Amino acid sequence: MAFLKAFGSYLPERVVTNAEIGARVGCDAEWIRNVSGIDERRFARTDESVTDLALRAAQDCLERAKVKAGELGMILVASGSSERQFPGPAASVASRLGLTETPCLDMPMASAGSLFGISLASRLCASLGPILVIGAEKMSKIVEREPMERGVAILFGDGAGACLVHPSNGFAKVLDCGLYSDGAYAEDLKLPFLTPLEMNGRSVILQASRKIPRAIATLLEQHRRRAADVAVFLMHQANQNLIVRVAQALEVAEDKFYSNIKNFGNTSSASMLIAAAEWSKTHRLAPGETLCFAAFGAGFHWGALLAEGSDA
């Protein structure tokens, strides 16, 4: 058994408006808002690394959970924008938390990494103890690579989110998770070494709008639950229009899908946890209520996770 204990997040201070990014790629602010639902995003300082962002989110999560770093059984970091091939940021985060022997795992996954991380943590925490899952991305250094592509540069921002998965107590019990991958579409969303991100936007939005609702519906059906009964959907914040499509496919009200993409843009594998951390500041999941996570990203990798409000 595994529980969600707390969330945490960190967003850089610098706000980049649609007007600013639009001026660089030749489009206006209103067009960006219409195609993405984004008004602004955050960009990290030049001297802020993925590790720096991840550490701040980790500290916020541990503080909210009232858990000390020394109690962790593992740290897992998902990031598609780490500064180097290896080592990844996980071990550095652990070191800066004062840990010297805690096992760490890096997941170089874009967008769906946090979902895969929580699923993995929910299966390992019974033997390892509390596991801190972090999604951290510095997408600004990628989208600013020349030549800047309009359909890519307007979407992304920087930030980090975290979730503490606990073996014995938390506000929600993890019920189940369905994960999927299909490498046939690997060329449609990729980041080669030292070159701009390449994205077939039409393929990504088409596949995501089909695969995410199917993953959610399959999981709900397996647990004899209806989409209408879900208290809140916490989804990867890729594009507001995609979130609307998923809600429509499931025939549920759009306001059941928590959204903060307007203010932070697409922060890839950090976005779902940033949204969860913001949601949890003002909302409480009642015992028995259902929470659904969902994500889709490069690979393609996608899936959904169900959790239920708990008294534990």
Image: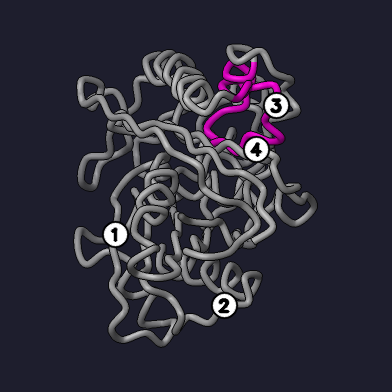
Residue 231 is one of the magenta-drawn residues = yes
For residue 53, above or below residue 186: below
Identify residue type, mark 3. Asp
- Numbered range of the magenta stretch: 225-247
Task: Classify residue 32 by image quadrant.
Answer: top right
The disc at residue 290 is 4
Q: Could you tell me which residue is drawn at 37 percent across and 68 percent down?
A: 75
Q: Tell me the SS state at disc 1.
A: strand
In this rendering, the label closer to the viewer, 3 or 2: 3
Name the element at disc 2.
Answer: loop
Image marks 3 and 4: residues in contact by CB distance under 8 Å = yes
The alpha-carbon separation of the residues under discs 2 and 1 comes to 22 Å
> Which callout, 3 or 1, points at the residue further toward the start of the chain?
1
The single residue placed furthest to the right in the displayed view is 282
Q: Which residue is under mark 2? A: 67
Q: Which residue is mark 3?
A: 229
- Between the C-alphas of marks 2 and 4, the distance is 25 Å
